[in-house]
Image (cartoon, helix red, strand yellow):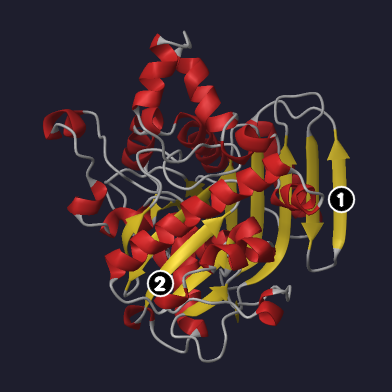
Amino acid sequence: MSQTHVLVLNSGSSSVKYQLLDMRDSSRLAVGLVERIGEQTSRIKHTALTTGCTREQNGPVADHQAALKAVAEELARDGLGLDSPELAAIGHRVVHGGMFFSEPTVIDDAVLTEIERLIPVAPLHNAANLTGIRTAMALRPDLPHVAVFDTAFHTTMPEHAARYAIDTKIADRHRVRRYGFHGTSHAYVSRETAKLLGKAPDEVNVIVLHLGNGASASAVRGGRCVDTSMGLTPLEGLVMGTRSGDLDPAVIFHLERVGGMSMDEIDTLLNKRSGLFGLCGDNDMREIQRRIDEGDAQARLAFDIYIHRLKKYIGAYYAVLGRVDAIVFTAGVGENAAPVREAAVMGLEELGLAVDGDLNGVHGDEPRLISPADARVAVAVVPTDEELEIATQTYALVGKGNGTYSTALA
């Protein structure tokens, strides 16, 4: 029996998301979520796509080990357990790979050590990713486990884009540079956009706008990232659901010296109480749009600030690329909020950008063009699929089940 199945795990601080895919046709066999790990109100939701059956359980899940055991049990109930001879590998989402990991990597002790060393620059994410990896490896130590890094796609940025203009010795000592995030999504979407245009990825220049609760932009030249909006952490760049994005760094000094706020309080402010939420009390674009329709001035201001920042990045990355073949919207807001897409390109006709109102208003799950037929620059909506990208990279690395694979740090 051939090994064609890949289990994708995304371990967060209090959750585990998972998908099991069959790489013969990239179909999903099962999807699920364990959330609120460590609480009495934990929930497990599992859907077997082979049968359409969905099961839910509510009750305490003590830790990630218990969560992954529950995942294994749910898969086993559908004949898809971790002991299946068809399981080729387990792919793990890892948020921060620093400069060491520019490609998917089979996990060994050296890789685990390096992921752990990067915890200070991604404390919430890498620590949780590491816990999930170690737990899964204990359950199936005989399988290859592959780390796919959010930062990997952005390691192609040239130094003039990746460096901050601070003392280089201090920057190097503390690993301070622009890493970028959402790279798995940017890689997948830029490649799918090229396919939509009927071209190879190395033939097109694309601006990718990943707009969800977290949001980032990237400039992709010939399939390689040359700039992205997030930096050392996911805080830099666009206005997001609860994150501020770009701001004068002296704001931090001012809040500490004049406002009397601690560093922890400022960190919480900028990451959890800013962005759309900080501006109008809502971080759901649907609710903000509803409030705008009712004449809410604060919601309108939040939307305008969001769009203004978005346009600045479109213009900046247009200048970086020199020639742009397509601008593509993806993720929750990018795929579903037609008013955001329309507003983002409004007034940029001189750059060859426009949307067709009818096409923009259509909802769908397939990649599609929303620009007029005669547009100089294509505007597209391409649903992201980070799990499929992780599975694809994992399966390619492990030799499609033949056991021939290598580690980047070997």
Question: Would you place residue 262 above or below residue 409 in this image?
Answer: above
Which disc is residue 206 wearing? 2
**Crowd class of label 2 (few under 14; some 14 to 19; many from 20; radius 10 Å):** many
Q: Can see residue 200?
A: yes
| Crowding at mark 1 (Cα within 10 Å: few <14, some 14-19, many 20+) | few
List x then y, in percent, for residue 349: 47, 76
Can you say whether 198 is above or below 395 in the image? Answer: below
The residue pinned by badge 1 equals: 55
Residue 401 vs residue 33, the one in the foreground: 33
State which quadrant residue 297 falls in: top right
Question: Which is more N-terminal, label 2 or label 1?
Answer: 1
Q: What type is the residue that disc 1 sits on? A: Arg
The nearer-to-camera label among 1 and 2 is: 2
How far apart are the two marked residues, 1 and 2, measured between alpha carbons?
40 Å
Reply above or below: 273 against 193. above
Determine whether, in the image, residue 155 is placed left or right of residue 369: left
Residue 60 percent coordinates (x, y): 80, 27
Judge left or right: residue 88 versus residue 302: left
Give percent across and percent down for residue 221: 31, 71
Q: Where is residue 30 in the image (x, y as percent from the top left)?
A: 73, 60
